[in-house]
Image: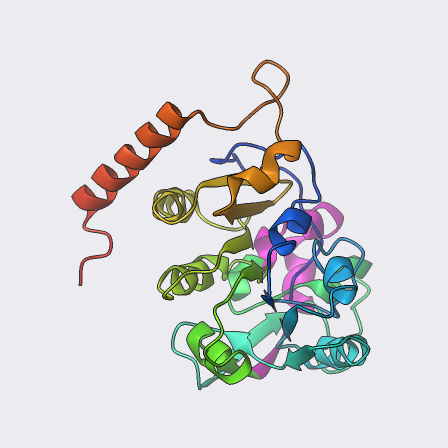
């Protein structure tokens, strides 16, 4: 379900990582990994597939709801040790069938001539988000996109249901989410896990400014730091794994000092308390 990377289309609330291969240090200490919105798996811009393909010790779960992409994913995952592919969309409730919207024939994977070729990667649970894809609108018009939209019913699971089925009691070490705007709800589910994932990567470019702001404060309560690489944000508990990815202030360094981290955490707690976030 994950689409092409859209660099820098929205203002970032996170400091930038100086190295774009941010998944590697996060995966280096992982025993379990879940990729939500896996597409066919081996797409060139995927931040983790190559590493996971060469890591037989990591239990790997790849999730993709769109039928033609899932068939390709199954073939690629079948080549990997200790891996499985799941045909589902991850939603808050789970266990239902929902309608998804694509700029392709979701069964055949064919793209209409009025939209760009890479539209075969773009599907969403929210029809309006297909019109918010900056890359698509650069090469097409709203009228043409509207005529190209197709729908399909897909099975759903909640994140907790998925983990219970695929990992059992094992904790989740690495979670990667790329779901064309549904990332916010999946990240919230991830933060409710006990414990939350040790490392968490998600795409923030299609999130509203309100959701990005809320996630920044929520994530500050759970992770040592977060940084942005293109349109992905990665949060991790193990800051020492990232020293080679960060630079000193004045040359692009974005790592916060202990006092800055403490101030960030204090402000996060106060803001969440005033907003009543987490109550009930």
Asked whether 239 falls inside the magenta stretch, the response is no
Residue 116 position (above or below residue 124) = above
Instruction: Tell me which segment is drawn in magenta.
Output: 130-153
Asked whether 147 falls inside the magenta stretch, the response is yes
- Please state the horizontal and vertical placement of residue 277, each as a whole percent of the image: 24, 52
Count of marks placed on residues: 0
Q: Residue at x 74, y 65 (%)?
A: 55
Answer with left or right where residue 14 lies relative to residue 245: left
Q: Residue at x 72, y 71 (%)?
A: 104
| Frontmost residue, 111 versus 251 | 251
Answer with left or right where residue 124 lies relative to residue 135: left
- Please state the horizontal and vertical placement of residue 95, each as a whole percent of the image: 44, 86
| Frontmost residue, 87 versus 236 | 236
Residue 275 in sight from this viewpoint:
yes
| Frontmost residue, 117 versus 266 | 266
- Please state the horizontal and vertical placement of residue 83, each as a whole percent of the image: 69, 77
- Which quadrant of the view contains residue 52? bottom right
- Please state the horizontal and vertical placement of residue 64, each as a whole percent of the image: 64, 74
Q: Main secondary structure of the magenta part?
A: helix
């Amino acid at each position: 379900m994950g689409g092409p990377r859209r660099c820098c289309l929205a203002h970032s609330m996170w400091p930038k990582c100086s190295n774009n291969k941010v998944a590697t240090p996060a995966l280096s200490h992982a025993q379990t990994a879940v990729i939500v919105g896996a597409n066919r798996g081996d797409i060139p811009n995927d931040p983790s597939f190559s590493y996971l393909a060469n890591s037989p010790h990591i239990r790997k779960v790849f999730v993709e709801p769109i039928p033609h992409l899932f068939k390709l994913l199954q073939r690629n995952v079948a080549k990997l040790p200790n891996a499985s592919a799941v045909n589902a969309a991850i939603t808050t409730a789970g266990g239902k069938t929902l309608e998804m919207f694509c700029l392709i024939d979701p069964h055949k994977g064919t793209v209409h001539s009025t939209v760009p070729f890479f539209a075969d990667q773009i599907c969403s649970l929210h029809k309006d988000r297909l019109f918010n894809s900056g890359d698509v609108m650069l090469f097409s018009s709203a009228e043409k996109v509207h005529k190209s939209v197709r729908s399909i019913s897909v099975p759903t699971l909640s994140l907790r249901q998925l983990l219970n089925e695929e990992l059992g009691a094992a904790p989740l070490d690495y979670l990667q989410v790329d779901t064309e705007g549904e990332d916010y709800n999946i990240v919230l589910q991830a933060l409710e896990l006990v414990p939350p994932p040790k490392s968490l990567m998600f795409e923030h470019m299609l999130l509203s400014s309100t959701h990005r702001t809320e996630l920044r404060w929520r994530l500050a309560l759970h992770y040592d730091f977060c940084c942005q690489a293109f349109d992905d944000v990665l949060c991790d508990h193990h800051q020492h794994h990232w020293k080679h990815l960060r630079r000193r202030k004045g040359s692009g360094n974005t790592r916060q000092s202990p006092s800055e981290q403490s101030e960030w955490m204090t402000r996060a707690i106060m803001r969440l308390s005033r907003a009543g976030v987490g109550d009930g």
